[in-house]
């Protein structure tokens, strides 16, 4: 499965299911085949993604360790949440500027 995010403010954004699921969970949405991020919710969604990116960067600064009992496996892959979430973050910022919703699966 793939996600195809759409907004009047930007071109379509396609993400694989694992990446789309991760982004949706970061903003407090349950992964689903269809959904909407309303324009009014975009400031909080943007802040949530930025916080998740900051948390990931903090983990990397501390040698890839999490709470002390394991390694951060995303660090070993070389592509982290920041890189995966960047296109969605840009779409959200454009949508917020134009007071537009973001939808998928419709």
Image (spheres, grey):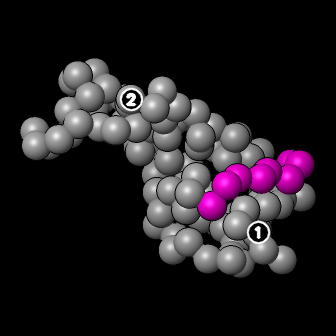
Residue 75 sits in which quadrant?
Answer: top left
* Residue toward you, 21 or 50: 21
Residue appearing at x 49%, y 40% in the figure: 81
Residue appearing at x 28%, y 21% in the figure: 61
Q: Can I make out residue 45 in this image? A: no
Residue 70 point in image, percent of width and height: 17, 41
Dot 1, crowdedness within 10 Å: few (<14), some or many (≥20)? some
* Residue toward you, 40 or 80: 80
Residue beneath disc 2: 76
As helix, strand or loop, the secondary structure at mark 2 comes to helix
The verdict on residue 21 being magenta is no
Residue 74 point in image, percent of width and height: 40, 37
| 45 with respect to 86 (left or right) | left
Residue 82 point in image, percent of width and height: 52, 35
* Residue toward you, 93 or 34: 34
Residue 38 sits in which quadrant?
Answer: bottom right
Q: Can I make out residue 17 in this image? A: yes
User: Mark 2 or mark 1: which comes first in sequence?
Assistant: 2
| 67 with respect to 91 (left or right) | left
The verdict on residue 11 being magenta is yes
User: Foreground mark, 2 or 1?
Assistant: 2
Q: Which residues are magenta?
A: 9-17
| 32 with respect to 12 (left or right) | left
| 31 with respect to 76 (left or right) | right
Residue 92 point in image, percent of width and height: 69, 50
Give the residue at the far left of this rendering.
68
As helix, strand or loop, the secondary structure at mark 1 comes to strand
Magenta segment main secondary structure: strand
Residue appearing at x 71%, y 78% in the figure: 34
Above or below, comparing residue 33 to residue 91 in the picture: below
Instruction: Identify the disc placed on residue 103.
Output: 1
């Amino acid at each position: 499965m793939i996600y195809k995010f759409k907004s009047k403010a930007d071109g379509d954004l396609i993400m694989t299911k694992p990446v789309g699921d991760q982004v949706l969970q970061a903003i407090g949405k349950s992964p689903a085949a269809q959904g909407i991020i309303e324009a009014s919710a975009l400031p909080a969604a943007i802040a949530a993604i930025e916080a998740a990116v900051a948390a990931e960067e903090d983990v990397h600064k501390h040698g890839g360790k999490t709470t002390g009992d394991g390694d951060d496996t995303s660090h070993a892959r070389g592509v982290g949440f920041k890189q995966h979430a960047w296109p969605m973050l840009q779409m959200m910022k454009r949508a917020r500027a134009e007071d537009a919703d973001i939808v998928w699966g419709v």
